[in-house]
Amino acid sequence: MSDNAVKRRGRPRAYDPEVALAKATDIFWAQGFAGASLDDLSAATGMNRPSLYGAFGDKQALFKSALDHYMDSSRAAMTQAFRGGGSLREVLTRIYHTALGFYLSDDAGGRGCFLASAGLGQALIDEEVRQIVADGMHELDRGIEGLMTRRQARGELPPTVDPVALGRVASMLMNALSVRARAGETREQLEATIPVMVDLVCGPAGTADG
C-alpha cells in the first residue's frame, strides 16, 4: 500500500460534527422543519447531501439530533442557573434571564425556544418529536416545582401555596417569554417584564423572601 493511500485513509473528516449540528440547529430554529430545505442545511453545515446523510441520517433524523443538541445546551445552562445560589427571587430572575439568552440571538434576533418555535410544528405530525418536546417542557416543570418545594420548606413561600402548581405557573411564564421573543419584542421589553414575573410568583419584593 502506498504512502498516499495511507494518508487518504487516515485523513480526518473535513467537518466538525458538533459545529455542523449547531449550524443545522440554527437553520431549523429560524425556518422550522418544513421550511428548512436540504440545500439550506447543506450550505449552513458546509456538507453536501451525501455527507449530511452519512453523518446524521435523513432530514428527520437530523432534526431530532438538533432537538437533542438544544436540550443538552439548554439543560447545561439551566443547571447553572438553578445552582447559582441566592434567594428564590434571585434564582428565578437568573433562570428567566438565562432563558432569554436562548430566546434572543445577536445574529438571528428573536427566535424563542427551539422546542416551541421549531419543535411544536413538527410535533403535530411526528409522535416521537411530540414526546421529545413534551419531555423537555416537563423536565423544566419538574425542576421549578422542586425549587418551589425546597424554598417553601425554607420559609420563602407561604405554607398555603401549592408549590407544584406555582412551579408550573413559573414555567409557563417562560413559555410567554419565548413566544414574545419569537414575535419580535426587544430585549429591553422582555427584560422589563422579568421583575414583574418574579413578583407574580414570589409576591411583591419584601413580602415573600421572609
Image: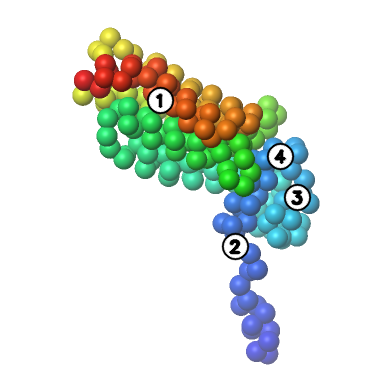
Q: Earlier in the sequence, mark 1 or mark 3?
A: 3
Which quarter of the image is occupied by the N terminus?
Answer: bottom right
Q: Earlier in the sequence, mark 4 or mark 2?
A: 2
Q: Which residue corresponds to mark 4?
A: 31
Kind of residue at badge 4? Gln
Residue 16 numbered mark, or none: 2
Q: Secondary structure at mark 4?
A: helix
Question: Is 152 placed above or below 65 here?
Answer: above
Q: Which residue corresponds to mark 1?
A: 195
In the rendered image, which quarter is residue 207 located in? top left
Q: Residue 193: x and y, percent?
A: 47, 25
In the rendered image, which quarter is residue 50 located in? bottom right
Say whether marks 3 and 4 touch (CB < 8 Å): yes
Q: Residue 169: x and y, percent?
A: 44, 19
| Distance of label 1 from label 3 (alpha carbons) | 39 Å
| Distance of label 4 from label 2 (alpha carbons) | 23 Å
* Disc nearest the viewer among 1 and 2: 1
Residue pictured at 63% horizontal, 56% vertical: 20
Say whether marks 1 and 4 touch (CB < 8 Å): no
Residue 97 numbered mark, or none: none
The 10 Å Cα crowd at callout 3, few under 14, some 14 to 19, many 20 or more, is some
Which quarter of the image is occupied by the C terminus?
Answer: top left
Residue pictured at 34% horizontal, 32% vertical: 91
| Distance of label 2 from label 3 (alpha carbons) | 18 Å
Kind of residue at badge 3? Asp
Q: Secondary structure at mark 3?
A: helix
Q: Secondary structure at mark 2?
A: loop
